[in-house]
Amino acid sequence: MKNRFSNDINIRNKQASFKYELIEKFIAGIMLKGTEIKSIREGKVNLQDGYCYFNNSECFVKGINITAYSQGTHYNHEAARERKLLLKKSELDKLEAKVEEKGLTLLPIRLFINERGLAKLEIAIGRGKKLHDKRESIKEKDMKRELSKIKLQ
């Protein structure tokens, strides 16, 4: 019988690297409720609309959609609630100072389960790309695709 819960979860926000120039990355723990980790292990997470913000020197992530657990009862979690990120005080201070700068934002780029079985969220400080930067990204992607086609032949 195949186990539906997986420990090798690696959910990426592909739009983040396209829309933003990622400057610095951090790994944060994420405060979850009981049924949320089960949905994550099933891979039912959407990071596309997620963003991070600060409230009273604490970092929260909002807009991440963790689908309600199918086997859950009335104790099931809300799919789009905000979740607290677990970071060291020094990292929080550094991130908050960076986000205060004009044009910088904090966004989730990857959700994974580490070797100890804990859900971790990789967040990055990003600066929005202009249209010409996005065109460059598309050109690079097309070049890589063409090179891989040539190598396969």
Image (cartoon, grey):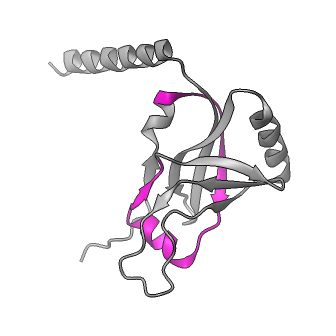
Q: Residue at x 44, y 13 (%)?
A: 136
Left or right, residue 27 beside residue 76: right
- The quarter in which the N terminus is drawn is bottom left
Q: Residue furthest left?
A: 153
- Queried whether the magenta region covers residue 46, the answer comes back as yes
Q: Quadrant of the C terminus?
A: top left
Residue 115 screen position, x and y as percent: 55, 60
Q: Position of residue 39 (x, y in %)?
A: 43, 69
Which residue is most to the bottom? 74
> In the figure, residue 69 lies in which quadrant?
bottom left
**92 versus 34 height, above or below:** above
**Residue at the image position 79 percent from the left and 35 percent from the top:** 100
Q: Which residues are magenta?
A: 18-47
Left/right placement of residue 130 relative to residue 144 reads right
Relative horizontal placement of residue 2, taking residue 83 as reference (left or right): left
| Nearer to me, 9 or 44 | 44
Tell me which residue sits at (83%, 53%) in the image.
57
Residue at (60, 42) in percent of width and height: 107
Front one among 45 and 9 = 45
Name above or below for residue 107 compared with residue 103: below
Residue 2: x %, y % from top left: 26, 72
